[in-house]
Image (cartoon, rainbow, N blue to C red):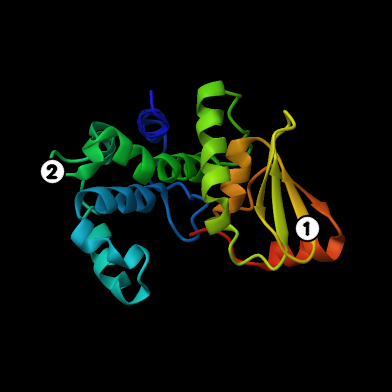
Amino acid sequence: MSLAHAERAALSDTLDRTDPDQPTLCAGWTARDLLAHLLVRERQPWASGGIVIPVLAPLTERAMRGYADTAWKDMVEQLRSGPPAWSPSRIGRVDEAVNGAELFVHHEDVRRGRPGWEPRGADETRDGALWDLVTKMGKLFYRRSPVGVVVRRPTGAQAVIKTGRGLVTIEGEPGEILLHAFGRDAARVELRGQQADVDALAASARGV
């Protein structure tokens, strides 16, 4: 089972048990807001430009508000059922490329919006897919870092993400590193290096 497929099912199950008004790690967003974002992104691509283009944000926000009166259960089932029939994401490889990281990160945005959260247990298949994402896309996520970046798993596997003056090694499980790469501070990673380099990385923007 692909990461995208597994995370879609797991996120849907989590949302089934979640109060739609619960806060998430996405500043200002409740679980309902986050789910509306995912549904607009997947089912109304013509209205999703505001996700990456600020001037189009009002269009996207209006589309998200369109779910205000939709029953929570129905919203969750729309996510669970997957992309609409006309979507290229119906193709497995496209779904994995477009939705693997997105669904994992937003799943954790929901999980970690609650007090007392803990990381999920290790899963060899999931963690392998997440490590591939970190090593292949890390250069994009950490492109604004003023210092070099290396990522390292507890197993000892590591990868150079970026070279530069100074160096910070980010140590943690693949999912924790991916969350940090996407700009989430609720990630259990260790930043190792000279304090000035660690501070410089921490002050830089991360993510897409």
Residue plotted at (64% across, 37% down): 116
Residue type, mark 1 in image: Leu
Q: Residues within 10 Å of mark 2 (few under 14, many from 20)?
A: few
Relative image position of residue 147 (x, y in whole percent): 73, 64
Q: Quadrant of residue 204?
A: bottom right
Relative image position of residue 150 (x, y in whole percent): 71, 49
Q: Residue furthest bottom?
A: 55
Image quarter where the N terminus lies is: top left
Residue 167: assigned label: 1
User: Is residue 113 in view from this perspective?
Assistant: no
Count of numbered badges drawn on the protein: 2
Residue type, mark 2 in image: Trp
Relative image position of residue 153 (x, y in whole percent): 70, 35
Residue plotted at (70% across, 33% down): 157
Q: Quadrant of residue 156?
A: top right
Q: Would you say 67 lies left or right of 6 here? A: left
- Residues under labels 1 and 2: Cα distance? 45 Å
User: Is residue 49 in view from this perspective?
Assistant: yes
- Which of 182 and 23 lies nearest the eye of the viewer? 182
Q: Would you say 64 lies left or right of 176 here? A: left
Q: Quadrant of residue 49?
A: bottom left
Q: Which residue is mark 2?
A: 86
